[in-house]
Amino acid sequence: MPAKTITLSNFSAPQESYLTLTLCDTFFSRLKGLMFQKGLPPGGGLLFDEKRDSRLNSAIHMFFMRFPIAVFWVNSANILVSKSLAKPWHPFYMPSTPARYIIETSTSNLELWNVGDKILFDEA
């Protein structure tokens, strides 16, 4: 079965760009994430749904990564609650407040969205 694609847009700044993400909803896709890949397209990335807000469950690692990524954490109310520039081989990144969704995307997107922005999810 092909992976599900989700489009995210920023309701707080609709003129800004949007992201087209692959939903990681299987054990293998969640385990693999972006490990061993060589890069990401500017508007692409991965989306993880932890099913409930949590700081610990929404933490990520950067082992076996070849490039830095932008990470956004969004809570159940679809508010961006934290963001970070994640660097290769760093053992641990966690949001500053509980989050349900983890978005891993190109570093070029880091400055486009800000903490407090309302994020819209749309299944493609």
Image (spheres, rainbow, N blue to C red):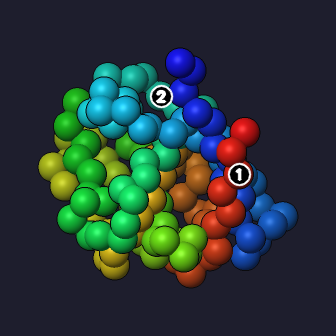
Residue 47 x %, y %: 49, 46
Residue at position x 68%, y 63% from top?
120
The residue sitting at the top extreme is 1
Q: Up-down: is 76 above or below 46? A: below
Whether pointer 1 and pointer 2 mark residues with C-beta atoms closer than 8 Å, the reply is no
As helix, strand or loop, the secondary structure at mark 2 comes to loop
**For mark 1, what is the residue?**
122
How many residues crowd mark 2 within 10 Å: few (<14), some (14–19), many (20+)? some
Tell me which residue sits at (27%, 70%) in the image.
55
Left or right: residue 117 compared with residue 60: right
Residue 13 location (% of width, % of height): 76, 71
Amino acid under label 2? Gly
- Residue drawn 63% across the image and 44% down it: 6
Disc 2 target residue: 39
Q: Nearer the viewer, mark 1 or mark 2?
A: 1
Q: Nearer the viewer, residue 30 or 95?
A: 30
Q: Identify residue type, mark 1.
A: Asp
Numbered mark located on residue 101 in the image: none
Task: Find residue 85 and report its horizontal and vertical position in percent.
Answer: 39, 57
Nearer to us in this view, 11 or 38: 11
Q: Quadrant of the C terminus?
A: top right
Q: In the rendered image, which quarter is residue 88 located in?
A: top left
Disc 1 to disc 2, how far (Cα)?
24 Å
Label 1: which secondary element: strand
Q: Could one spot residue 71 in this view of the protein? A: no
Residue 14 position by quadrant: bottom right
Callout 1: 10 Å neighbours few (<14), some, many (20+)?
Answer: few
Q: Residue furthest left?
A: 91
